[in-house]
């Protein structure tokens, strides 16, 4: 673990953005998330790590209520963003998701042109007053997702015609285009080459100045490079949560240590 | 040996061959199935295929060809003085076949011995055959009896040859494959090839029958155009056939019929497409599991109602209702049969068709598309309008075109709902009719298959066929393009 270059560890603010307390998630009879309590800070990158199937994606989907779209899923407990209970009856999940953007584990561009993919969110939420502004948003979003140079000459081509890694960056651009306050990224780099990964990591750094970013990753080195806080999940429980440096150099739980030293997962 | 027993025997040989082949393969591998190129059963199946397939194919061909070949030789035995023309000869040959079969039956049932049957006399034969249930039309002529006996003899000889040939083929097939069966023989590939041939055969039959239908229509249509000018048929604005015998020339213009067909189909589509599509969207995107589980089968039951029932509904309920509620008060006519009636009822018939196809297509849009849209803060209807429908659109268009070709081909609802009067009119409350209805009416009753009034049905049918074929090709093309959209 000596080669890990830990970036600035300091958490910029102690302000809590997302506060989850006693969250339970069930898929029918499967208990997928068991009593997770976590405070996610604003203007911070928080990494979720853990073996496959431990519930990282599931927990991530609780934060923007995407689990509502799965009929068998049931969420219990209390999740607040900026102090507001997002599972309250008065909260409109649609409004919430505009504020809490998400990049999915598998790239899922719409079968539309690249331009339409990126402009989809801004159009729905009326973020642009005219075509020029919309063009502007599309270009900056694509640049931030490190895709602009590759697609600037074919914005009208279908998004589904891009390579897997390009599709994933398109989905990142799409999510960034709505300027969310929180960005949830589920293994955003699993299909990317080292160069694109580096670009996406730079984007994450940049996003941190304004947003709170939660990233699920299977790469220890990525977690240590991009995140300030790390949470380790194991079989539906959150075993350990703390500053990334502490988790990687001085894990308190044996399961965490086994995982990051490569003995499980 | 009769074909039935022959088939059974070949099947039994195939079974024995399969067991032997499997055993030989296993023996050549020293009893270890892992050494074999293919699984042991493939060796058995391979031998069985080589035993049965050539033998049965030849048997099938033989059974078709033998009667044809013998007919010619037997009819030569009948003196030319016994008949006047080809028709009379055909009748005589039918008698010959009947007597021959009757004699065979008599021997089988024990009414006659084989020797008695061979020596049977013309005089009392008719009565004796009647005893065992074979009725022969007229008194049996000695020359007919001679021909019948000739037929029996030739038949018996051909049957014998057939049995020998088939069994020899089966044996040769067995010897050929059994000799080649050993551990390294690629039985699996050989069986695979046989399956391929079977599938090719099946699709060839499907294609050839279609081709046959089209060709027969094409010939009759050409026949029609020899008697009636094509320009009249395609461009005349009147449809007025005069039936043969009553004299007078008829005008057979297809345009009034096409007009009726298109008018009714368009009304049907205007009714069925929005309702069908919206119900599909509701069922696939909004409805709960329980409602869906109950509504979808119900819609599909609607699709199973025979169209004649819809026709009755049009005739008895919808037609009078439209006339009394709308047409008469507005002064638009007072006929219960109208384009509107048929169009509405046909639209109702097509709703389940459109909705169940669209539902399948909408369901085929991957969940990830919806997730992506919801994840960006889109509402359900925004997601449907902007992501799901555009993604499913080509498929939906395909479904609509298929519905259109059903509407164009529909007959019963039109007869009962729109009547049989061929005319061009824009008033939807007038009775009009379609191509299909006229095909039926030209072919029912006393028909003379050489008059243009009858032959026109084939030209109408072919036109209809070309129209629906065009629509279907278009639909398939669009549906195929749609398939390429997600990886
Ligand atoms: N839609 C679903 N229906 C039923 N069970 C599900 C569903 N999605 C996830 N699960 C179950 O919930 C548990 C957690 O799954 P989740 O996708 O959150 O794992 P993960 O940590 O993201 O794994 P990975 O690293 O492989 O993506 C697993 O046991 C999984 O089988
Ligand atoms: Mg996951």
Image: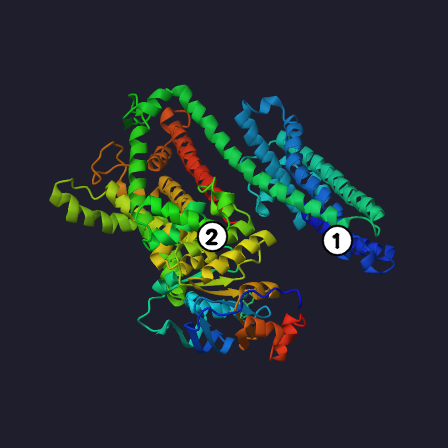
Q: Mark 2 belongs to which subunit? A: A
Q: Measuring 44% from the left and 59% from the top, which residue is drawn there?
A: B371
Residue B300, quarter of the rendered image = bottom left
| Badge 1: residue crowd in 10 Å (few <14, some 14–19, many ≥20) | many
Q: Is residue B413 visible?
A: no
Q: Nearer the viewer, residue B98 or A50?
A: A50
Name the residue that disc number 2 marks: A144
Tags 1 and 2 on a common chain: no
Quadrant (top left, top right, bottom left, bottom right) of the N terminus of chain B: top right
Residue at 55% across, 42% down: B135
Please state the chain letter of the residue tagged with numbered disc 1 in the rendered image.
B
Residue B378's spot in the image, x, y percent? 37, 58
Closer to the camera, B349 or B361?
B361
For residue B43, above or below residue B64: below
> x%, y% of residue B62?
68, 38
From the image, tell me which residue sits under label 1.
B42
């Amino acid at each position: 673990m000596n080669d890990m270059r830990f970036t600035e560890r300091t958490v910029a603010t102690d302000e809590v953005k997302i506060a989850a307390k006693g969250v339970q998630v069930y898929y029918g009879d499967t208990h997928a998330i068991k009593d997770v309590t976590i405070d996610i800070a604003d203007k911070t990158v928080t990494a979720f790590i853990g073996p496959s199937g431990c519930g990282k994606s599931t927990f991530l989907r609780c934060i923007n209520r995407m689990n509502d779209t799965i009929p068998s899923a049931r969420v219990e407990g209390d999740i607040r963003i900026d102090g507001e209970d997002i599972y309250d009856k008065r909260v409109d999940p649609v409004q919430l998701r505009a504020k809490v953007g998400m990049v999915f584990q598998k790239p899922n561009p719409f079968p539309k042109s690249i331009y339409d993919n990126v402009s989809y969110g801004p159009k729905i939420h009326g973020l642009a007053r005219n075509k020029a502004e919309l063009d502007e948003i599309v270009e900056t979003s694509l640049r931030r997702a490190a895709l602009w140079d590759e697609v600037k000459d074919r914005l009208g081509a279908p998004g589904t015609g891009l390579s897997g890694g390009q599709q994933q960056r398109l989905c990142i651009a799409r999510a960034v285009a709505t300027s969310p306050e929180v960005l949830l990224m589920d293994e955003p780099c699993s299909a990317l080459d080292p160069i694109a990964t580096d670009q996406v990591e730079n984007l994450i750094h940049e996003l941190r100045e304004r947003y709170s970013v939660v990233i699920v990753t299977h790469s220890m080195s990525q977690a240590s490079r991009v995140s300030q806080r790390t949470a380790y999940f194991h079989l539906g429980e959150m075993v350990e949560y703390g500053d990334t440096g502490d988790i990687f150099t001085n894990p308190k739980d044996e399961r965490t240590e086994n995982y990051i030293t490569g003995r499980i997962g | 040996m009769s074909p039935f027993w022959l088939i059974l025997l070949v099947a039994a040989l195939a079974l024995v061959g399969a067991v032997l082949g499997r055993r030989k393969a296993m023996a050549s591998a020293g009893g270890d199935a892992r050494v074999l190129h293919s699984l042991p059963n493939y060796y058995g199946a391979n031998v069985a295929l080589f035993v049965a397939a050539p033998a049965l194919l030849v048997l099938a061909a033989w059974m078709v060809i033998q009667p044809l070949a013998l007919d010619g030789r037997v009819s030569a035995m009948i003196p030319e003085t016994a008949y006047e023309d080809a028709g009379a000869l055909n009748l005589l040959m039918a008698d010959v076949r009947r007597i021959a079969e009757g004699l065979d039956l008599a021997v089988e049932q024990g009414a006659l011995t084989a020797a008695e049957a061979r020596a049977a006399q013309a005089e009392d034969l008719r009565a004796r055959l009647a005893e065992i249930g074979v009725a022969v039309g007229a008194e049996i002529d000695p020359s007919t009896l001679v021909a019948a006996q000739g037929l029996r003899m030739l038949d018996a000889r051909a049957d014998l040859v057939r049995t020998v040939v088939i069994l020899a083929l089966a044996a040769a097939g067995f010897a050929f494959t059994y000799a080649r069966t050993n551990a390294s023989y690629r039985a699996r590939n050989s069986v695979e090839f046989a399956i391929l041939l079977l599938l090719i055969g099946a699709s060839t039959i499907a294609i050839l029958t279609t081709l046959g239908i089209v060709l027969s229509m094409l010939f009759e249509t050409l026949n029609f155009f020899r008697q009636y000018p094509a320009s009249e048929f395609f461009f005349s604005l009147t449809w007025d056939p005069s039936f043969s015998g009553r004299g007078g020339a008829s005008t057979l213009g297809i345009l009034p019929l096409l007009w009726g067909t298109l008018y009714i189909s368009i009304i049907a589509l205007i009714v069925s497409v929005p309702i069908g599509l919206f119900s599909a969207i509701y069922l696939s995107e909004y409805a709960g599991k329980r409602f869906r589980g109950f509504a979808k089968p119900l819609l599909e039951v609607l699709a199973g109602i025979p169209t004649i029932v819809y026709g009755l509904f049009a005739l008895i309920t919808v037609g009078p209702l439209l006339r009394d509620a709308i047409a008469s008060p507005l002064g638009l006519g007072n006929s219960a049969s109208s384009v509107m009636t048929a169009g509405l009822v046909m639209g109702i018939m097509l709703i389940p068709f459109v909705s169940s196809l669209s539902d399948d297509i909408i369901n085929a849009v991957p969940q990830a598309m919806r997730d992506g849209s919801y994840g960006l803060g889109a509402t359900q209807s925004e997601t449907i309008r902007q992501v799901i429908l555009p993604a499913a659109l080509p498929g939906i268009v395909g479904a609509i075109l298929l519905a259109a070709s059903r509407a164009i081909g529909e007959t019963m609802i039109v007869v009962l709902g729109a009547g049989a009067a061929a005319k061009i009119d824009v008033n939807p409350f007038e009775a009009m009719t379609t191509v299909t209805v006229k095909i039926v009416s030209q072919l029912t009753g006393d028909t003379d298959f050489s008059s243009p009034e009858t032959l026109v049905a084939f030209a109408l049918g072919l036109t209809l066929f070309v129209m629906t074929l065009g629509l279907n090709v278009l639909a398939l093309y669009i549906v195929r393009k749609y398939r390429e959209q997600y990886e």
